[in-house]
Amino acid sequence: MASSEASRSSPRSRRELEVRNPRQDKYSVLLPTYNERENLPLIVWLLVKSFSESGINYEVIIIDDGSPDGTRDVAEQLEKIYGADRILLRPREKKLGLGTAYIHGMKHATGNYIIIMDADLSHHPKFIPEFIRKQKEGNFDIVSGTRYKGSGGVYGWDLKRKIISRGANFITQILLRPGASDLTGSFRLYRKEVLQKLIEKCVSKGYVFQMEMIVRARQLNYTIGEVPISFVDRVYGESKLGGNEIVSFLKGLLTLFATT
Amino acid sequence: NFRAQSSGPHREGELRGPKVVTMTKLAQWLWGLAILGSIWAVLTMGSLGLELPSSYQEVLWPLPAYLLVSAGCYALGIVGYRVATFHDCEDAARELQSQIQEARADLVRKGLRF
Ligand SMILES: Nc1nc2c(ncn2[C@@H]2O[C@H](COP(=O)(O)OP(=O)(O)OP(=O)(O)O)[C@@H](O)[C@H]2O)c(=O)[nH]1
Ligand SMILES: [Mg+2]
């Protein structure tokens, strides 16, 4: 599917798009952080590299929820290094959760497109130019990274986690027929007004929040493009995938099944 | 194909009319199962007066069970296949590691205290 999309626009028209649009379009990256002192400088460095190499106008909005490990201090240093017009700090006092972090960050975003990603290095900024190209190709409202299609994949997952992930994805596809292959991933590009509308509508938390965003998007007839991504599990910091997560995922899935 | 079906939120009303009732996914499943179930019931009970040959009856009776089992096998097969063919992005991990080294060095040069 991805390749048929890619072959539709001729090389010339694509080049024209790339020359014309980067100057008008601005991309705001929302980076929610909680205890990402190790990762934050690295992800910001990679973001700056990726954006400046492809000549894209951008800003990075860091939403730190009072991390006890001093993430905020590192963020302030990064603001000094890269400039307050590129790195925007919009911290909050305490841990209030991811969903509200996005809302908070979006209030301060000046771009017309929003990119959401994790700060733990599992989402690599090198894919962002591909997201942007994809979005322009199909004039999509949303472009979602996918681990389950084409060259997409994961690194650092054991067999158990792969089975859970593939199994959960299969059940979700059967029950919700959402029109996108990676529902729990959170590496996505949105038109700003689309994200605003979706966030208003979404009520769930955690993994289910990402899933609900796509399901609501389908309900509202928004178009979704997909780009295969490699997901490298976090190198620094704690990872959590416990029984709790699975139970709340199933609950959320059934809720969406019954209500959408 | 989801790209073909949706055409932007602004055109929603135009295309579908305002009075469209959208079923939840649960309702769609229940409807589907109810329809298939009643077809099966009508055929096996012979309540329409059409008497099927007994060889058909023998196949029809356990059909739901067969379907259930084969759906289960299909699901297990698909998930198993996808687990086995899940890409391990060794290259991406290696590339990231070397970029981390590069980033650290550059950031220290720019004056960052880790
Ligand atoms: N601002 C803010 N950021 C958060 C909060 N919880 C998580 N994050 C950040 O959101 C991103 C995703 O969180 P993760 O902990 O990586 O969640 P995950 O990817 O589902 O799980 P693992 O990577 O396996 O631990 C990371 O950048 C976190 O730092 C929160 O309450 N507030
Ligand atoms: Mg993560």
Image: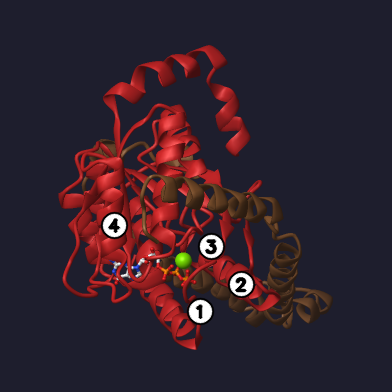
Chain colours: A red, B brown
- Residue A18: which disc? none
Provide residue B101's location: percent of width, then percent of height. 56, 52
The mark closer to the camera, 2 or 3, is: 2
Q: Residue at x 61, y 72 (%)?
A: A167
Q: Residue at x 50, y 73 (%)?
A: B34
Q: Secondary structure at mark 1?
A: loop
Provide residue A117's location: percent of width, then percent of height. 40, 54
Precedes in sequence: disc 4 or disc 2? 4
Chain that bears disc 3: A
Q: Quadrant of residue A202?
A: bottom left
Amino acid type indicated by mark 4: Ala
Q: Secondary structure at mark 3?
A: helix
- Residue A241: which disc? 1
Discs 1 and 4 carry the same chain letter: yes
The mark closer to the camera, 1 or 2, is: 1
- Residue A75: which disc? 4
Amino acid type indicated by mark 3: Gln
Provide residue B57's location: percent of width, then percent of height. 76, 79
Amino acid type indicated by mark 2: Gly
Q: Residues within 10 Å of mark 2 (few under 14, many from 20)?
A: some
Q: Secondary structure at mark 4?
A: helix
Instruction: Say which residue label 2 marks.
Output: A167
Relative depth, front residue between A175 and A90? A90
